[in-house]
Image (spheres, rainbow, N blue to C red):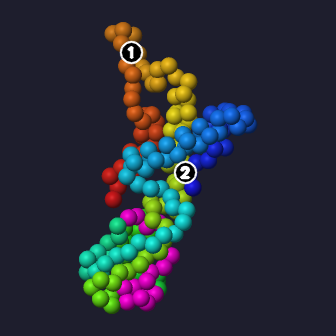
Amino acid sequence: MAYTVLATVKEYLALDSSTAHDALINRCIAAAQAAIDSYTGKRFEATDSTTHYFSQSDLDGTELLLDSWLSQLDSITNGDGQTLATNLVTPEPRNTWPIIALKSANWRWSSSESEVAIIGRWSWSVSAPADIVQACVRWSAYTYRLKDAAIFEATANNDLGQLMIIKGIPSDVKALLDSYRGLF
C-alpha cells in the first residue's frame, strides 16, 4: 500500500475528476514513497506480515537483536520448532514502536543451525504516520508539477542579478523527513 492515494494527491493538486493523468500521478506517488524510504532509511508501513529468521549469533544474552524494525509482532517459532508465546517476550524499546529487539529467557535452539522464526510486519509503523503521508502527498504533487516547469525550482537574487536553480527535495518535505533520519 502507498503512503498516500491518488484521490488525496488529486485533491491537493485541485484537479478535477478526469482520469487523464491518473497513471502519471500514481507513478509520482510510487517515486515519492521510494524517495522517502531512501532518504530516511526507513520503510513506514507494511501491509502484510512476513517471516524473518534469526540464529543464535543474533542473541545478546537474553536479547534477540532484530535485522529490521518490527511494527507488529504476530508469532514466534523457537529454534526448537515450538511456538513461543508473545507474552513471554518483552519488546525493546518498551511501550513504543518500532521494536528493534526482543528479550526473553525462553529462546531455544535444537541445533546450532536451527533458527527462530518471527512473523510480523517489518517496518517503522503499521501505517504511515501523518507527517510521512503529508510528505508523500507534497512530494508526489511536486513531482507531478515538474512536467510543466521550464525551470524546475529557482530563486532569484535581484541585487546580484542571479538566478539559482535549487535541486533535490522540496524544503518543506525535507523538514518533515529530517526528524526521521538517524533514529535507530
The residue identified by callout 2 is: 3
| Element type where label 1 sits in the image | strand
Asked where in the image residue 27 lies, by quadrant, the reply is top right
Depicted 148 relative to depicted 84: above or below: above
Asked where in the image residue 169 lies, by quadrant, the reply is top left
The residue identified by callout 1 is: 163
Q: Amino acid at mark 1?
A: Leu
- Does residue 40 show up? yes
Q: Quadrant of the C terminus?
A: bottom left
- In screen coordinates, is 40 left or right of 15? left
| Residue stretch in magenta | 68-84
Q: Quadrant of the N terminus?
A: bottom right
**In the image, is residue 148 part of the stretch drawn in magenta?**
no
- Residue beneath the point at 55% across and 51% down: 3
Depicted 96 relative to depicted 177: above or below: below
Q: Amino acid at mark 2?
A: Tyr
Depicted 126 relative to depicted 115: above or below: above
- Residue beneath the point at 46% across and 20% down: 151
- Does residue 106 show up? no
Residue 173 location, x and y as percent? 46, 39
**In the image, is residue 78 part of the stretch drawn in magenta?**
yes
